[in-house]
């Protein structure tokens, strides 16, 4: 039976796709974590020369692993040597640590997102710099005597070692100050906002020297290539992207994979733009001030593949004696929430990546958010989205199940053909095609709707995989997190049972090869095994899809049978 062959082909193609993705994830090379490298600094402007007697010692980013606290243990060795502690800043959404050495972020905890569902779980730390891990958000100024990240003599001072956003304030301003030997005053200002994961980072430069100076601001993200321990996916198949990304005026949103970076360093010029490091559910990004000509490049630890860096460098600014200048960028470290990201920079919302089927995934996501606004529970929203999708695809379902019903009526005639023509497969095929033509039956009519549904299923997979809203979102009873697999496998078993029932409701031609029949019978078992590893939210969608399909088939088949009885009368 052609429709059965096509059905098998579609399912096997889909399963092969999942297996291939899983194989790629399991067999990709595991990089060795090494101490971070020092990126090659861009030469200063031709008119600016570096003093021969100026010395710079490289900032060591090896972190102390002796202190267990997430707040206290990310102390750079350089700070320990100078008996300095990082400055702690707390808002209603963030708890960050800022190093006085060059004033860089070395820790960022998201207070609304826990590492696990356990009641004593700590907030997830995106800038994880302990236990051999490296993840730093760096910023500084290039130029003679400027506080770039190699200049460990540029140790900033702040009025306090701990800042906290007050309840009656919407923003918190934290200043770090440093004066170089020539009297140039550098103020690095951090502005935090209530309810946001966005921080404004500004350099206010006051040239108190007698010479004209030039500075340019850089921002970078430096990270090892290992998956975050608290974000390793338990699912099977397609995995969320982990790695650098950037945006330019010409190439728009582009992912620059670790493998690509290891083969060739990136170098691009752009107006505006941004850089980011993506991981499952979260993103770290630097967005420069607008209307600047920027350079985006990458560096790597040659031959070690341990640590990589993506950097964005703004244009030079000249600062006359006794004049001031401002350099600015925005730093985001937080969840991949489209509504927030699109307000920060053009294209930043694209870091919520729905793959090549984004044009299907995007409206599905909006529909999911729309329903969740009414029912509050994300699982209930998934059920309503399933109902909506099945309603939209009802014309296809009607064609599919009417085709099944017609094929079922032809089974006695097809059985008679098999008995008459026996093993003459060529003659049997010819007679079957004549029968289909006479009875106006399309043998592929039951498979085309299934083919249409596969892109919807894959798009929804990405929506559920990428939506941070589903992380730790409960359903009911034992299902406390829709983003991970069902711990007791109840949903996959129910899904398998519903698929078995659907299979029994579909016509089976007597001409089907015995091997095909066995494969069809085993298909619910195969699919159940695969769905055991899928996120509970996705299995819930497929289970509801099957149950609604069964109800639709019963209704459509009943209507068809009534039509046939009416014609006989």
Image: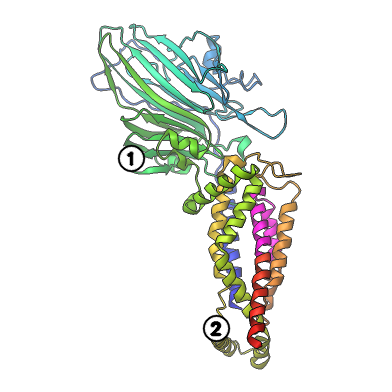
Was residue 184 drawn as part of the magenta stretch in this picture? no
State the residue lying farthest toward the bottom: 420
Residue beneath the point at 28% across and 11% down: 323
Q: Which of marks 1 and 2 is in front?
A: 2
Residue 544 is inside the magenta segment: yes
Span of residues in magenta: 523-549
Q: Please say if 415 is above or below 298.
A: below
For label 1, the residue is 249
Picture layout, residue 204 above or below residue 476 = above
Q: Is residue 125 above or below residue 159?
A: below
Q: Tell me: residue 423, above or below residue 265.
A: below
* Position of residue 318 measured from the top left corner of the image (x, y, whole percent): 26, 18
The residue at which mark 2 appears reads as 440
The kind of secondary structure the magenta stretch mainly shows is helix
Residue 277 at least partly seen: no
* Image quadrant containing the N terminus: bottom right
User: Residue 205: where, in percent of width, then height?
Assistant: 35, 14
Judging depth in this view, the residue of 504 and 561 nearest the camera is: 561
Relative depth, front residue between 195 and 60: 195
Q: Position of residue 121 (x, y in %)?
A: 69, 29
Residue at x 57%, y 78% (from the top left corner)? 443
């Amino acid at each position: 039976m052609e429709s059965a062959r096509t059905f098998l082909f579609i399912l096997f193609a889909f399963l092969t796709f999942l297996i291939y993705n899983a194989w790629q994830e399991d067999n990709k090379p595991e990089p060795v974590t090494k101490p971070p490298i020092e990126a090659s600094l861009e030469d200063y402007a031709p008119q600016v020369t570096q003093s021969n007697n100026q010395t710079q010692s490289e900032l060591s980013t090896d972190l102390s692993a002796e202190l267990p606290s997430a707040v206290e243990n990310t102390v750079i060795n350089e700070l320990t040597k100078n008996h300095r502690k990082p400055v702690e800043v707390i808002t209603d959404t963030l708890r960050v640590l800022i190093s006085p050495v060059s004033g860089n972020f070395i820790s960022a905890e998201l207070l609304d997102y826990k590492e696990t569902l356990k009641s004593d779980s700590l907030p997830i730390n995106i800038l994880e710099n302990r236990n051999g891990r490296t993840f730093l958000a760096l910023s500084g100024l290039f130029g003679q005597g400027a506080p770039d990240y190699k200049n460990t003599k540029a140790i900033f001072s702040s009025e306090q070692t701990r800042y906290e956003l007050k309840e009656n304030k919407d923003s918190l301003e934290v200043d770090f100050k440093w004066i170089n030997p020539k009297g140039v005053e550098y103020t690095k200002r951090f502005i935090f906002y209530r309810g946001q994961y966005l921080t404004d980072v500004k350099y206010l430069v006051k040239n108190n020297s007698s010479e004209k100076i030039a500075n340019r601001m850089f921002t970078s993200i430096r990270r090892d290539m290992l998956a975050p321990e608290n974000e390793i996916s338990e699912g099977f198949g397609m995995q969320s992207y982990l790695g650098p990304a950037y945006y330019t005026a010409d190439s728009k949103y582009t992912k620059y994979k670790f493998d690509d970076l290891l083969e060739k360093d990136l170098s691009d010029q752009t107006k505006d733009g941004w850089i980011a490091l993506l991981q499952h559910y979260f993103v770290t990004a630097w967005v420069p001030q607008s209307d600047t000509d920027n350079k985006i490049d990458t560096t790597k630890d040659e031959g070690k593949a341990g640590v990589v860096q993506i950097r964005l460098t703004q244009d030079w600014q000249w600062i006359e004696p006794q004049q001031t200048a401002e350099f600015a960028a925005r730093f985001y470290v937080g969840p991949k929430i489209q509504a927030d990201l699109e307000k920060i920079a053009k294209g930043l919302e694209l870091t919520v990546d729905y793959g090549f089927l984004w044009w299907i995934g995007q409206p599905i996501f909006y529909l999911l958010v729309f329903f969740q606004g009414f029912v509050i529970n994300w699982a209930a929203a998934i059920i309503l989205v399933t109902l909506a999708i099945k309603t939209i695809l009802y014309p296809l379902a009607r064609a599919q199940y009417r085709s099944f019903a017609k094929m079922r009526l032809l089974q006695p005639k097809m059985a008679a053909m098999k008995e008459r023509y026996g093993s003459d497969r060529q003659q049997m095929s010819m007679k079957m095609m004549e029968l289909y033509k006479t009875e106006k039956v399309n043998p592929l009519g039951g498979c085309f709707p299934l083919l249409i549904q596969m892109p919807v299923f894959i798009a929804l997979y990405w929506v559920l995989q990428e939506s941070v809203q589903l992380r730790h979102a409960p359903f009911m009873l034992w299902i406390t997190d829709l983003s991970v697999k069902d711990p007791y496998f109840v949903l996959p078993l129910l899904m398998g049972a519903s698929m078995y029932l659907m299979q029994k409701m579909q016509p089976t031609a007597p001409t089907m090869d015995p091997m095909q029949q066995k494969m069809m019978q085993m298909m619910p078992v195969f699919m159940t095994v695969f769905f055991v590893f899928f996120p509970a939210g996705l299995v819930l969608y497929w289970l509801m899809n099957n149950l609604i399909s069964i109800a639709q088939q019963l209704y459509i088949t009943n209507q068809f049978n009534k039509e046939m009885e009416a014609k006989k009368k």
